């Protein structure tokens, strides 16, 4: 656990920031955050989805189908390997802090939208984004699991952006023993009926509701990082936050760039939340047949509204 002045307390940090194609600018930004994190005894820092190299330059249609060859032929963020110099550079800055970053992963045969948890000692865990919004399949292949893994701050699970809209994703990690779930995003504001004030945007509201609901229903600590500012025609909602296992927001950046920081006694807070009602223990999977059976009662696809997830210039 990190040393923050309180025995058993871990300092958690979630970043809202603007990260694009310029890797040198990203290293400088990441380095400043991690220098302060090490000095403050922070245990975990989460950076946004695609912070190493930026998000996609365009999105297509939900009906399009990508192949490994077509994905590699598209213009997009740089494809990085898990054992490459880019992640090693982040490891050198991490020290004993658990750091979560997002990147376009070169998986050999295919590309993946990937989250990596690491320290200066190496990679702790990897998650490939499972749920893909409009056209993301044209650039990335989909992942297939939500496994938890052990870290110096406890057992954690990872997910990326749209994954948070699916309760099964967080539940799978929680059932695998995750006490903390780190959700990194490049979550934009709405393009249809967009609010002039981003704080009142309906996609911002959804982002926050998902974060709080996923923490509450699984009784876990939730760490949500997100892109902020603008990239092409996207306007990101920011709102990086730390959420307690009762669904309470412990710290938030609001719509601006910044860092949400909270000191949390993870084991104590989970024990309090699970003292009377323990959602994971009290499950009745025997009654959830249609939920856990693959493709049971499949819902027909609804035509996509392309304006909701815009292409980038």
Image (cartoon, rainbow, N blue to C red):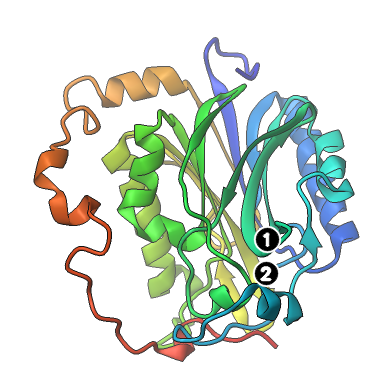
Quickly name the residue at label 1: 50
Q: Secondary structure at mark 1?
A: loop
108 to the left or right of 221: right
Q: Are marks 1 and 2 in contact (CB under 8 Å)?
A: yes
In this rendered view, identify the residue nearer to me: 84 or 246.
Answer: 84
Q: Categorize mark 1 by other alpha carbons within 10 Å: few (<14), some (14-19), many (20+).
A: many
Can you see residue 235? yes
Q: Badge 2 is on which residue?
A: 55
* Position of residue 78 measured from the top left corner of the image (x, y, whole percent): 80, 66
- For the C terminus, the image quarter is bottom right
Q: Which mark is residue 118?
A: none
Q: For numbered disc 2, what is the local secondary structure?
A: loop
Q: Residue furthest left?
A: 287
Query: Can residue 248 be seen in this snapshot?
Result: no
Quarter of the image where one finds residue 1? top right
Q: Residue at x 66, y 49 (%)?
A: 47
Residue at 55% across, 74% down: 137
Along the viewing direction, whichever of 258 and 63 lies nearer the viewer? 63
- What residue is at 85 percent from the left and 60 percent from the top? 23
Q: Quadrant of residue 279?
A: top left
Relative to residue 303, is residue 47 depicted above or below? above
Residue at image position (61%, 76%) is: 67
């Amino acid at each position: 656990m990190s040393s923050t002045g309180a025995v058993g307390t871990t300092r958690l940090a979630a970043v809202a920031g603007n990260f694009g194609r310029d890797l040198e600018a990203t290293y400088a930004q990441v380095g400043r955050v991690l220098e302060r994190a090490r000095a403050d005894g922070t245990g975990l820092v989460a950076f946004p989805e695609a912070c190493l190299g930026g998000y996609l330059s365009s999105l297509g249609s939900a009906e399009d189908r990508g192949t490994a060859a077509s994905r590699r032929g598209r213009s997009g963020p740089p494809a990085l390997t898990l054992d490459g110099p880019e992640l090693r550079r982040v490891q050198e800055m991490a020290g004993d802090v658990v750091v979560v970053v997002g990147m376009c992963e070169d998986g050999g045969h295919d590309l993946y939208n990937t989250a990596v948890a690491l320290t200066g000692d190496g990679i702790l865990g990897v998650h490939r984004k499972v749920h893909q919004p409009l056209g993301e399949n044209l650039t990335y292949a989909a992942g297939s699991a939500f496994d938890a893994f052990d870290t110096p701050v406890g057992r954690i699970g990872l997910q990326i952006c749209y994954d948070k809209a699916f309760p099964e994703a967080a539940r799978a990690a929680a059932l695998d023993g995750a006490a903390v779930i780190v959700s990194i995003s490049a979550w934009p504001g709405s393009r249809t009926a967009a609010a002039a004030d981003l704080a009142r945007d309906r996609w911002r509201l959804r982002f926050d509701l998902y974060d709080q609901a996923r923490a509450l229903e699984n009784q876990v600590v939730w760490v949500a990082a997100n892109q902020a500012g603008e990239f092409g025609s996207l306007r990101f909602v920011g709102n990086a936050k730390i959420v307690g296992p009762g669904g309470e927001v412990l710290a938030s950046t609001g719509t601006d760039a910044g860092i949400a920081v909270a000191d949390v006694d993870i084991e104590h807070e989970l024990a309090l939340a699970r003292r009377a009602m323990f959602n994971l223990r009290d499950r009745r999977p025997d009654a959830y047949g249609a939920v856990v059976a693959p493709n049971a009662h499949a819902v027909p696809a609804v035509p996509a509204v392309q304006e909701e997830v815009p292409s980038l210039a």
